[in-house]
Amino acid sequence: MNHVLDQAQAGMPRHLGIIMDGNGRWAKKRGLPRTAGHTAGAANFKKITRYCASIGIEYLTIYAFSTENWKRPSDEIEALLKIFQQYLEEALQDFLGENIRVNFIGDVSVFPENLQSLFARTEAVSADKTGMVLNIAMNYGGRAELTHAVHLLAEQVQRGALLPEQITEDVISQYLYTAGQPDPDLVLRPSGEFRISNFLLWQSAYTEYIIMDKLWPDFTTRDLDSALQEFSNRNRRFGGI
Ligand code: IPE
Ligand code: IPE
Ligand code: MG
């Protein structure tokens, strides 16, 4: 905890979260189908991820697909799955040369086999990298994550491996997809929406939020710099004075 505070006081987030939002509106503004916005968003994801690694962000968590995004029309979902596949096939080549460790967070068991195997291959290829940890949230929801953790804990208690009073905040954190990682210091939400949309609910108890009035495909490294600048001026008290 002290380490997290030290880093936060040094002005740079150790763990940055980004809710990639606004792809659909970006496309609509240009008279394009929403899927064109997702393609542009994926390209930007690549650029911003590289930049984060280059400036020393230790953990980057990107919200790519939520547990609620299945409500979208099937043609949009199909297009998104295709983009994820294309992106990961390319990324697999890129990651061979980059010092980024990829980790998928969320229940990925619901995705088609080919995508699941791409997720697994990407994690395997990057497993021994020592640079930035990139969490890609896929079929991720903060409530689903907590429900999953509660199921695992209940099983442990049922087997007699854990006593209810042994379930502390630290133990719960260890049962989340982000086990072993620091909580996010800063979450950015482009697209101007003032809401959390089920992202890192437990982990963001004391996270700073910056909402930016830019749609994700238009979000630049300069926008990131200005958010980091704003973050460095925030006074984080964690309930203290
Ligand atoms: C974010 O952009 C991408 C995903 C949620 C997959 P949106 O598709 O939500 O774009 P808007 O919010 O409709 O503009
Ligand atoms: C949040 O964006 C989820 C992702 C970016 C993956 P949404 O567009 O789904 O969120 P709402 O519906 O505006 O809350
Ligand atoms: Mg949206």
Image (tube, grey):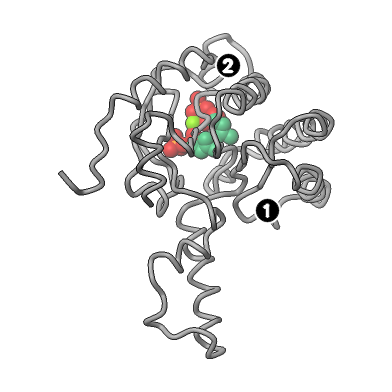
Q: Which residue is mark 1?
A: 108
- The location of residue 19, given as percent across then percent down, is 49, 34
Tell me the element at label 1: helix
Q: Residue at (68%, 53%) from the top-left corner? A: 108
* Quadrant for the C terminus in the image: top left
Looking at the picture, does residue 179 appear above or below residue 137? below
* Ligand 1 neighbours mark 2 (CB distance < 8 Å): yes
Q: Residue at (40%, 54%) from the top-left corner? A: 202
Relative to residue 73, is residue 222 drawn left or right? left
The extreme top residue here reads 30
Q: Earlier in the sequence, mark 1 or mark 2?
A: 2
* Label 1 neighbour load within 10 Å: few <14, some 14-19, many 20+: some
- Distance between the alpha carbons at the discs numbered 1 and 2: 27 Å
Tell me the element at label 2: helix
Looking at the picture, does residue 160 appear above or below residue 81? below
Q: Residue 89 versus residue 33: which sits nearer the camera? A: 89
| Disc marking residue 27 | 2
| Disc marking residue 177 | none
Q: Residue 198 versus residue 127: which sits nearer the camera? A: 127
- The location of residue 17, given as percent across then percent down, is 48, 36
Relative to residue 44, is residue 115 drawn left or right? right
Query: What's the amino acid at mark 2?
Result: Ala
Q: Residue 80 versus residue 150: which sits nearer the camera? A: 150
- The location of residue 171, given as percent across then percent down, is 46, 69
- The location of residue 153, given as percent across then percent down, is 50, 75
